[in-house]
Amino acid sequence: MKMWKLGCVTFVLFSGPLANAQTATPTQALALEQQGKLAEAEKSWRQITQADPRDAAAFASLGLVLSKQGKYGQAVPAYRKAIALNPKLPGVHLNWGLAEFKQQHFDAAIAPLSAALADDSKNLQVLTLLGLSCYGANRFADAAKYLELPAKSDPTNIELHRVLAQSCLLAKKYSCALDEFRQILEQDPDSAAVHMLSGEALDGLGRTVEAIPEFEAAAKAAPREPNVHFGLGYLYWKQHKYDEAKAALEAELSIDPANAQALAYLGDIELKRNAPEKALPLLNKAIHLKNDIRIAYLDIGAILSEQKRYQEALVALLRAEKLDPAQPDAHYRLARLYRAMGNVAAAEREFARVGELNEKAEDMAPKMSGPLPALPQ
């Protein structure tokens, strides 16, 4: 068995009865491996596989020696060959999956690790590797499923619980995320990042009032943390507390003048205060920095419609509608615009669409999204 340390998690390369050949050459190869003479052992296993291309155990052992040397790219074809010759060889799927994982080939790691899990559904090492691979492949619901048991089995492993919590949050399993973040906060109560993530989970559960103190705690713990003031401002905005929202958004912009989301919501507040001349520059700057902020296009369309700049307004509102066709407000503004332009048929279609849709709450998580935290190395 070969032990590998990955962050707070130890993984084991399975070196079980993969090379039980009775000839002298495999015995010599194993002896070289046990002596730590890995380059010589690799050469011996290559000679064995060349002499007998049907020797599955020899290919598995070659892959193992290559992995021990960190030659994961070369190990993978050896593992593949071993499995092609004998799919029942113990430990090879796990070693293959680990070799893919170590190269950050997360999608490629999932299939062999799933096969390893099928042989041992409670294996914590396999579950952890599979969960981390799914996380790395942006398959967050699967990651949460596989990481649950390893995390429960190791309550002090903060890194593992962070990945599980993030997976739950991104999969919109907000109760799971909140439970994990609370557990992390018990061990690290001053973590601004975890307070922010807890706030996101609470907001996802519709508990926005409870989410605000989490962001306030984050802002107190790390007043220069990127996005913390934006998150607080957005929550105040949802509660129609526009004075508090404006102060928080301006605090965010003092830290990051290019925060497009903060500019967009600040522009929306100015529009709500009947100050379109102040709103429009903020909104235009926001979409110049980031071209997928729906509320900015919606507000720009509304302002341009009032200014009778109908063609420009139509472009903005169609962009808002495209970004989220299920939100009725863009369809409503389009209907009014089409009516003002004299396009009665188009207006009726949009009004009908409004009647089909129910206003749905927008999640905070997409607005707060940034680069995913790195997996343990």
Image (cartoon, grey):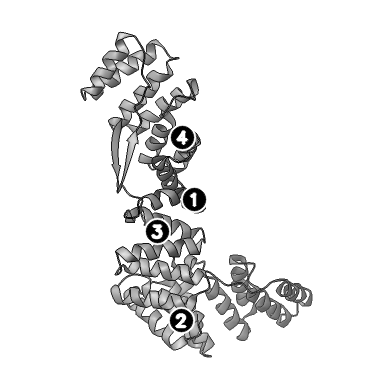
Residue drawn at x 71%, y 77% as measured from the top left? 335
- Alpha carbon distance from label 4 to label 3: 30 Å
Q: What residue type is labelled 1?
A: Lys
Determine the secondary structure under disc 2: helix
The residue that label 2 is drawn on is: 236
Q: What element carries label 4?
A: helix
Q: Which residue lies furthest to the bottom in this view?
A: 274
Out of 30 and 366, give the one closest to the viewer.
30
Q: How crowded is mark 3: few (under 14 residues within 10 Å), some or many (20 or more)?
A: few
Secondary structure beneath label 3 = loop
Instruction: For marks 1 and 4, give the CA distance.
Output: 16 Å
Observer-side mark, 2 or 4, equals 4
Q: Earlier in the sequence, mark 1 or mark 2?
A: 1
What residue did someone put label 4 on? 116
Q: Report if residue 103 is visible in the image.
A: no
Work out whether mark 2 precedes mark 4 in sequence or the reverse, and give the earlier one.
Answer: 4
Instruction: Work out whether mark 4 precedes mark 3 in sequence or the reverse, and give the earlier one.
Output: 4
**Which label sits on residue 145?**
1
**Where residue 218 appears, x then y in whole percent?**
34, 73
